[in-house]
Every structure is written in C-alpha cells, then in structure tokens.
Amino acid sequence: MGDAHRQLHRFVEERAGDTYRTMFYYTADDWETIYVRDDVATDHLRDTVPEIIERTREARALVREEDYETLGETTATTEVHESGVIIHFPEEDHRGVLVSLDPDAARQLTGFVSHCVTILHSPTASAFKARPTPD
C-alpha cells in the first residue's frame, strides 16, 4: 500500500464518515485490508474477501477504451446493492482498490438505481418500453 492509498483512505473517511464500510487494496497475488468498520468486521466478511478479491482481479470493464474511445479509460466501476455500494478503482498491473459504503453515501446514485429497478419491476413497465416507429 502506497501513499496514494493512505490518502484515499483519509479522503473517504473524511467525506463518507460513518457510511464508510471497508477498503481493500489488492495486487496480482496478494491483498490487504486498509479499513473495516467495526460492525462490518465479521468472520463471514473475513472468509469472503479472498474470493471477492479474486473475482475483482478477473473483472473486465463493460466498455473497454479500445471498443469505444469516446468514453475513455475506465477509472472506476460501481455496484449498487440493497445494503451497500461497492466502488472498484482498477490500477495498472492487476492492482486496485475496493471501497464499500452504506447506500446513504451515494444517495443520488442509489435513488436513481432504485427508481430504475422499480420501473423495471413495475406491472406498468410496458409504458416505458420503446415502441417501434411507423415506416
């Protein structure tokens, strides 16, 4: 873990406050815990992290820079879960950082995603579907 990772930890701690859940740093063949909030520090998390890190190492961007240059390089990916948000910051040489926050930390994003999910699962969702245009 380098200075940049310590600075990132301090920044997330300062900005996210009590919503900051975890931070892990990984390399191609190892990983380390940077931060785990007390209520999240369970045996289950400890047992699950190695598998999560392994899947993260294998993760590929949905859109690669070479596929669609207009978007540019992937700087982070985000997963929104019911009880947390996970942000992955990939780095060169199969290294990176995983940060987990409570949903409140990303209120606008989680609200947006929740609304989209509601639309997708709504019985009236057909009203939002694209309709073919007449020729």
Image: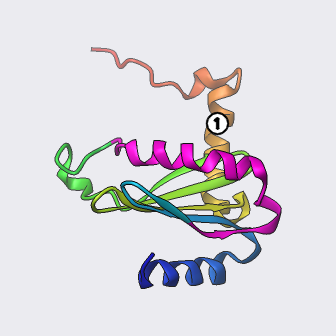
Residue located at (56% from left, 78% from top): 9
Residue located at (19% from left, 43% from top): 67
Neighbours of disc 1 within 10 Å: few (<14), some (14-19), many (20+): few
**Is 92 one of the magenta-colored residues?**
no
The rendered magenta stretch, by its main secondary structure, is classed as helix
Q: Which residue is mark 1?
A: 117
From this viewpoint, which residue is outermost toward the right? 39
Residue 42 falls in which quadrant of the image? bottom right
Q: Is residue 21 left or right of residue 54?
A: right
Residue 48 in the image, given as x and y percentages of width and height: 64, 45
**Is 56 one of the magenta-colored residues?**
yes
Position of residue 17 relative to residue 123, above or below, is: below
Q: Quadrant of the N terminus?
A: bottom left
Q: Check disc 1 and give the amino acid type.
A: Val
Camera-side residue: 69 or 128?
Answer: 69
Camera-side residue: 41 or 130?
Answer: 41
Camera-side residue: 26 or 70?
Answer: 26
Q: Quadrant of the C terminus?
A: top left
Q: Looking at the image, how many numbered discs can be counted on the residues? A: 1
Residue 97 in the image, given as x and y percentages of width and height: 47, 63
Tell me, what colour scheme is on the image?
rainbow
Position of residue 92 relative to residue 110, above or below, is: below
Position of residue 101 relative to residue 44, above or below, is: below
Residue located at (40% from left, 48% from top): 57
In the image, which residues are magenta?
Answer: 33-62
Circle 1 — which element?
helix
Residue located at (65% from left, 64% from top): 22
Residue 79 in the image, given as x and y percentages of width and height: 56, 48
Residue 74 in the image, given as x and y percentages of width and height: 32, 57
Camera-side residue: 3 or 67?
Answer: 3
From this viewpoint, which residue is outermost toward the top? 135
Q: Is residue 16 left or right of residue 10?
A: right
